[in-house]
Structures are given as C-alpha cells and as structure tokens.
C-alpha cells in the first residue's frame, strides 16, 4: 500500500471541497483550484478529511495513488497558505526592478533589459535589487515561473553569476591554469 496515498488530507475550516466525478475543486480564502483525477483513483469526502482510494493493486493504480493524494493536498495548502519560491541574482550590475506586482524588469548583463510578465494567478515580491519572490496558490505554476526566470541567465560554474534559487548551491569549477 502507498504510504503517502493512504494518509488522509485534512481540510481546514474555511476551505470548501467539491467533488464532481473525477473533478476535485478546492475553494479557500486565497482562491479556487481544480484538478481532474486520473481514471482508477477515487477521492472521497469525509468529515474534515479527504480520502484517496484505489480499486486494485495494479502498477498504474499504485503509481497514481500517492501522486493524486499529493496533488489534492497541494491544492488545499495553496488555497490556505499559498506558495512562494525565492530567487537571488548574483553578478556585478545584475539587478531586478518591479514595474508592477505582475511585471519585472531584469538587467542581466545583456545589451538590453528583459521585461518578464507574470501569468494569471502569479505575483512577484522584490525585497531588494538582487532578491525576488514568486508568489501564487498553484504550486506547479509557481515552480514553473521561477524556473523560467532562472532560465533567463542560469548560474555559470566559473564565477557563479546568474539567477539562482535561494539557498541553491552552485558547483564551482577551477579556471584554466596559467603558466
């Protein structure tokens, strides 16, 4: 039995869960999220908890069991607390400016500045010229937007310059040896 899949998802007060066949919709104080559950898996609503059940022990059912439970739990956490991914910029002259809560302007060593627009449901927080955060209720979308920002200028291994996740360790290489 899946250790993660058999754990119940606790639903805090103020969160409304609607199950309509395979579609699970979670509504909370920060917004609404919905997810379509894969075929053999069933989500059942109890008093204050959600249970994710699988009908048999086939390989596909086992693999989808824990995944579905985690996705439903991420929706519940997202509509109550939300998610934030922090990024930091390293490099001389590299900086970020907040044009609006949904638009950033980067100076990353290119000949031009880069304007980055947030998709629906994502906002940015800028704590300084080299620190920023991606905030939203959908965990997958927050991670994807943060990865796209990091992709603008990946950290390089020789000097470590670029956009990195907060706390990310960059493996450094030794430069060429001089004679």
Image (cartoon, rainbow, N blue to C red):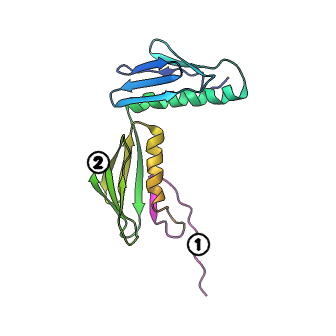
Q: Find the residue positioned furthest to the bottom.
A: 179
Q: For the point 58% across and 31% down, which residue is it?
A: 67
Q: Quadrant of residue 16?
A: top left
Q: For the point 32% across and 52% down, which residue is it?
A: 103
Residue 163 among those drawn in magenta: yes
Q: Residues within 10 Å of mark 1 (few under 14, many from 20)?
A: few
Q: Quadrant of the N terminus?
A: top right
Q: Secondary structure at mark 2?
A: loop
* Residue 146 x, y percent position in the rendering: 44, 50
Q: Find the residue positioned furthest to the left.
A: 100
Residue stretch rendered in magenta on the structure: 158-179
Q: Secondary structure at mark 1?
A: loop
Q: Find the residue positioned furthest to the right.
A: 58
Q: For the point 38% across and 25% down, which residue is it?
A: 27
In depth, the one of 91 and 78 nearer the eye is 78
- Most common secondary structure along the magenta stretch: loop
* Residue 29 x, y percent position in the rendering: 32, 27
Residue 73 among those drawn in magenta: no
Residue occupied by mark 2: 101
Residue occupied by mark 1: 174
* Residue 35 versus residue 122 in the image, above or below: above
In depth, the one of 166 and 47 nearer the eye is 47
* Residue 123 versus residue 178 in the image, above or below: above
């Amino acid at each position: 039995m899946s250790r993660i899949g058999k754990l119940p998802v606790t639903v805090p007060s103020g969160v409304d869960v609607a199950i309509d066949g395979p579609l699970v919709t979670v509504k909370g104080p920060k917004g609404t999220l919905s997810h379509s559950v894969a075929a053999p898996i069933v989500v059942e609503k109890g008093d204050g908890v959600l249970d994710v059940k699988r009908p048999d022990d086939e390989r596909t059912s086992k693999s989808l069991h824990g995944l579905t439970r985690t996705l439903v739990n991420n929706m519940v956490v997202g509509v109550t607390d939300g998610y934030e991914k922090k990024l930091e910029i390293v490099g001389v002259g590299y900086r970020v400016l907040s044009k609006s809560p949904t638009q950033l302007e980067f100076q990353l060593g290119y000949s031009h500045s880069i304007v980055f627009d947030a998709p629906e449901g994502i906002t940015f927080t800028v704590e300084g010229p080299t620190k920023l955060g991606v905030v939203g209720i959908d965990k997958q979308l927050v991670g994807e937007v943060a990865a796209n920002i990091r992709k603008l200028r990946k950290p390089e291994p020789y000097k470590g310059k670029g956009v990195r996740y907060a706390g990310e360790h960059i493996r450094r290489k030794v430069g060429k040896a001089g004679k």
